[in-house]
Amino acid sequence: MKRRLSRDREDRPSSCKGPADSCKRVRQPAEDSGDVLPDWARLPQEMLLHIFQYLPLLDRAFASQVCRGWNEAFHMPELWRCFEFELNQPASSYLKATHPDLIKQIIKRHSNHLQYVSFKVDSSTESAEAACDILSQLVNCSLKTLGLISTARPSFMELPKSHFISALTVVFVNSKSLSSLKIDDTPVDDPSLKVLVANNSDTLKLLKMSSCPHVSPAGILCVADQCHGLRELALNYHLLSDELLLALSSEKHVHLEHLRIDVVSENPGQQFHTIKKSSWDAMVRHSPKFNLVMYFFLYEDEFGPFFRDEIPVTHLYFGRSVSKEVLGRVGMNCPRLVELVVCANGLRPLDEELIRIAERCQHLSAIGLGECEVSCSAFVEFVKMCGRRLSQLSIMEEVLIPDHKYSLDEIHWEVSKHLGRVWFPDMMPTW
Amino acid sequence: ETRGGNTIESTVATMVVNSVHWFRKGLRLHDNPALQEALNGADTVRCVYILDPWFAGSANVGINRWRFLLESLEDLDTSLRKLNSRLFVVRGQPADVFPRLFKEWNVTRLTFEYDSEPYGKERDAAIIKMAQEYGVETLVRNTHTLYSPDRIIEMNNHSPPLTFKRFQAIVNRLELPRKPLPTITQEQMARCRTRILDNHDERYGVPSLEELGFKTFKGDSSHVWKGGETEALERLNKHLDRKAWVANFERPRINAQSLFASPTGLSPYLRFGCLSCRVFYYNLRDLYMKLRRHSSPPLSLFGQLLWREFFYTAATNNPNFDRMEGNPICVQIPWDHNPEALAKWAEGRTGFPWIDAIMTQLRQEGWIHHLARHAVACFLTRGDLWISWESGMKVFEELLLDADWSVNAGSWMWLSCSAFFQQFFHCYCPVGFGRRTDPSGDYIRRYIPKLKDYPNRYIYEPWNAPESVQKEANCIVGVDYPKPMINHAESSRLNIERMKQVYQQLSHYRGLSLLASVPTIQEEAEPPMSDDSYASSSTAGEARQSSIIILTGFTVQLSVFFALFLSVNQNVTTLPDLTKKSFTMPKKINA
């Protein structure tokens, strides 16, 4: 329905004046043959609803201009449960934004229908402000899902903290049934988390709050203590504590499904605290199937406290250079490892470390190596040992060092053989 | 030189052939079939180059590129002089210039080398049409690439290969590229004398940089790359000598020396066509077979040339290849719009010496090593600044000698993980990568002299040096050299999340694996079968699951996969030719 129709059609009586020609074509044969053919304007609302659910918003909006019946269908609550507000300024983004008039309409007519809402904002403060503005008006909303997503630099962090908090707490207080909350890179703080907990402790299942610098370990502990249905949690390492893990493993608490931890260095030489092995053990006992996802962004010499004891990590990402020694410890202490991604290591071959990982990480099914070095023979050995459980094998071409046994051209056949599918290393243009 | 007599018979009998060979790229006399066609049986031949300083796309051309071009034109002119001819440099736009020349010179034949780029094809189609109206026969020959891009596309079921591996698989099945032709000889030229006017230099001479409006300085000897066919062929010999001496055809691992401009580097000469890619190809091949006792060389020997072919092929039918919006193969990523940050990057003021040195070398000399390109491209886009690859592409277009439309745009899309199914996890650290490549720091010291007294320990991250060290090195960070413009750990953390968000939204992957967010295409040795039955029975939902594509072993036509992959993203124009594929239920938007 891409035809632009004049808006005054809304005022006409409900019989279809819209795609008038096609209506006539539909009707005339009916009158001739005596068969009953559908009158498009009189389609049952359930049917219209079903069809509209397949249309993107813009097409639905055009359809709503066709006749009153279709316009009513357009405004049915079921079509307004989910909405993604896109807030972009031309000066800071190439993307289009949700039209301000549409936003007004939604707040006016549909704010009490909204259940699953997300805000996508670009790097400008105006966009973040606009998001807060809308949030403050969602007083009649009983949201189940709320996501605040920065598509570029986190603009929520540039707002005055109190402004953001007051807008957010409107939702916390009024929703009372929030199940999923994504507030990464925002200035949320401990008191606002208390408000969240006071109103939504029974329903909260997912909380993603990576890089929220105003939250303290006590703040997140409060959430874990009260929200026993919490299944997914994402936060920064500085918020992680033994108490938190124990709270998440308490009897009252459901099984945790996944825990995502970002370990980020603010200043070089930063010291990180350690988590006791017993705390991790308690987690595994309580939630044997849980996934522990850890993303490291540290300098090489900041890894001291990590991987000294067994840790139940399943997905491991090293975003900066990580030393051979640390990778050796990973092999020793991460028996549950499923995915390992290494951006860079430095120019000493990781042969031994890889073999050890193949031996001891029996669940490893995905590995990615960036700026590293591995001899071809060791790599083939690694693949042979892992066999077909490797469903993701992403190795940059420069990683593989040809040796007496294999050249670069031969290695992909060897590896393909052991993997059971055709495999090539990742390439970069050499132009 | 005028058309023959008054009767039709005499017109036919005394039909004079006045040829014009139009140089655009292909600035050489060797391996130039189009030029040979111009000479073939001609009475006169004139070689022209049309200088159009305002033609869209080349408005963004820096001084090094102009210099290289002018030197190449001078070289052509010199070579033609030895053959008793000259180069005719004509100012203006082809569409205006040709009618004038056709009339003035009574042109009957026009020849030029095929240009596979969309803009080029459009311009040439118009010229050919116009030539027809003037009764001028046009002959075009394909020699800028080893193969015909259309042929490769045809062999890949009518769509360009979107992975390098598939591209190589297809090339492997082709016969060898056509052998290069020798250079134009005295004899050939002697048969077609061209009258050179006394005022040739004034009217048709190669302009100088000053005439084009550039300011040059005396003793400005920074042009490390000298343009022209002569230089190109000399370099080729040196390049081959070095390979023979090394007797090693493996891809050389990067070392500190590789960062500096090589006297045997050939990429700008291939871009301008001063060196024929076929000559390079066959010379490499022959050398390999001589040294390795006649064993057939692997495709990896021609890596550089094949990447070039790959991008030309990918771009030839896609006029939107150089932008994100409206480009069916480009992932729509919500890049940031930040002119200030872009300027710092472009001008080498990021505060990261590794990045700044590379951008300085680029601006001064016009060439940087391909790994240096990866480093700065990653920094600008998905690594640190989150700025669109289109902006980076434009800066390279201005400064990089070997950047042409297809290869530049394609490389930027590749490096920013916007196309070609690239994994985005590997991020080049603006400190670590540089340090690992050149531990001595000499590269930094050469291009950022201000930092030359910094010790190796701090030269890649001067902001971490204690004040005493900074004072001793006579370069205070924040005063004499900029502070780092971002925090790399924080930026890379943010950006890996952004990339993951984008890819997960596209592929609807809900799992935890970072690697699985990017769909992988099963590479087959054989090009895909025409597999419409699979395409029509699959739902949008199924095809999005990368695991199904791997495990079922079906070969999926890339165009189908991509259309399904991209169709749910409303910002992207889906691939046009989906007439054969039928979709079942599209996904419910409000699920």
Image: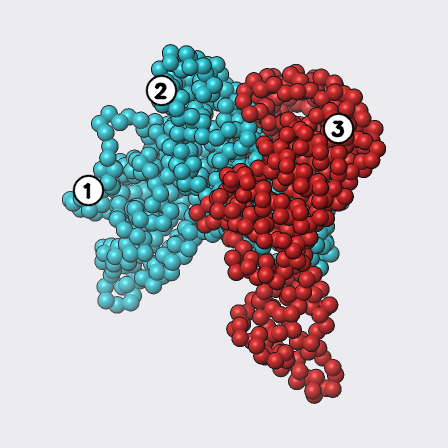
Chain colours: A red, B cyan
Q: Against B379, is A118 above or below?
A: below
Q: Quadrant of residue B229?
A: top left
The chain to which mark 2 is attached is: B
Task: Give how far across and how far down residue B578 sits, in percent.
Answer: 62, 58
**Disc 1 marks which residue?**
B201
- Which quarter of the rendering shows the N terminus of chain A? bottom right
**Residue at image point 30% right, 52% down:** B93
Nearer to the camera, A235 or A377: A235
In the image, taking residue A76 as reference, residue B51 lies left or right, namely left
Real-space CA distance between mark 2 and mark 3, rounded to the nearest whole angstrom: 52 Å
**Disc 3 marks which residue?**
A245
Q: Identity of the amino acid at label 3?
A: Leu
Q: Crowdedness of circle 1 by 10 Å Cα count: few (<14), some, many (20+)?
A: some
In the image, taking residue B583 as reference, residue B122 lies left or right, namely left
Task: Give how far across and how far down residue B52 sits, in percent.
Answer: 30, 48
In the image, taking residue A103 as reference, residue B202 lies left or right, namely left
**Residue at image point 67% right, 75% down:** A40
Residue B192 in view, yes or no: no
Q: Secondary structure at mark 2?
A: helix
Q: Quadrant of residue A180?
A: top right
**Residue at image point 69% right, 20% down:** A274
Q: Secondary structure at mark 1?
A: helix
Q: Identity of the amino acid at label 1?
A: Asp
Q: Identity of the amino acid at label 2?
A: Pro
The chain to which mark 1 is attached is: B
**Disc 2 marks which residue?**
B449
The chain to which mark 3 is attached is: A
The reply to whether dot 2 and dot 3 touch (C-beta < 8 Å) is no
**Residue at image point 57% right, 61% down:** A105
